[in-house]
Image (tube, rainbow, N blue to C red):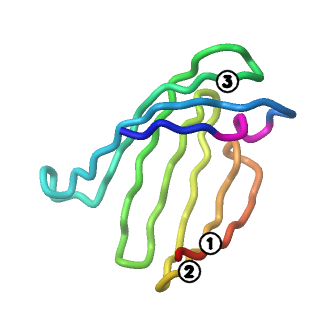
Amino acid sequence: MIFGTSSDRIGTPEGQTFYVTVSKNLKAETRLPIAPYAGVAYSTFEHRFLPIGGKNISFSDRWSSLVIFDGVKVSPTVTYARGRHAFSFLLARGNRPGVSYSVTF
């Protein structure tokens, strides 16, 4: 279970969100490389609770996809990871392309 806070959804001009999610890697139970999550978020921009969820799918040790539902729109991602580095391509709100790069330490 994760409790967190973040800027509000992609596409909102302002606001903050507070959320709680639960997740489970189901590979041992299903033999499929999937890890779904679900939760609820409170949007200060919209002043309402939103259901959130998604699913991570691992294609290999380096390639994965995360499909994110932010309570309003779906944003799919594809990630390539190598060592401490990860490069992602996403379609924010399902139609706005973007990229990210992250380093773990």
Mark 2 → mark 1, Cα distance in angstroms: 6 Å
The three-letter code of the residue at mark 2 reads His
Q: How many marks?
A: 3
- Residue at 61 percent of width and 68 percent of height: 88
Element on which disc 2 rests: strand
**Whether label 3 touches label 2, CB < 8 Å:** no
How far across and down, in percent of the image, does residue 28 sit? 14, 57
- Residue 20 at x, y = what percent? 46, 31
Q: Amino acid at mark 3?
A: Ser
Figure quadrant of the N terminus: top left
Identify the magenta region.
Answer: 6-11
Between residues 82 and 73, which one lies in front from this camera angle? 82
Among the two numbered marks 3 and 2 on one chain, the one whose residue lies closer to the N terminus: 3
Residue occupied by mark 1: 102
Indicate which disc, 2 or 1, sits on the residue closer to the N terminus.
Answer: 2
Q: Residue at x 72, y 32 (%)?
A: 16
Query: Are the residues tagged 2 and 1 within 8 Å (C-beta)?
Result: yes
CA–CA distance in space, label 1 to label 3: 26 Å
* Along the line of sight, the residue nearer the viewer: 43 or 59: 43
Q: Residue furthest left?
A: 29
Q: Is residue 18 left or right of residue 82?
A: right
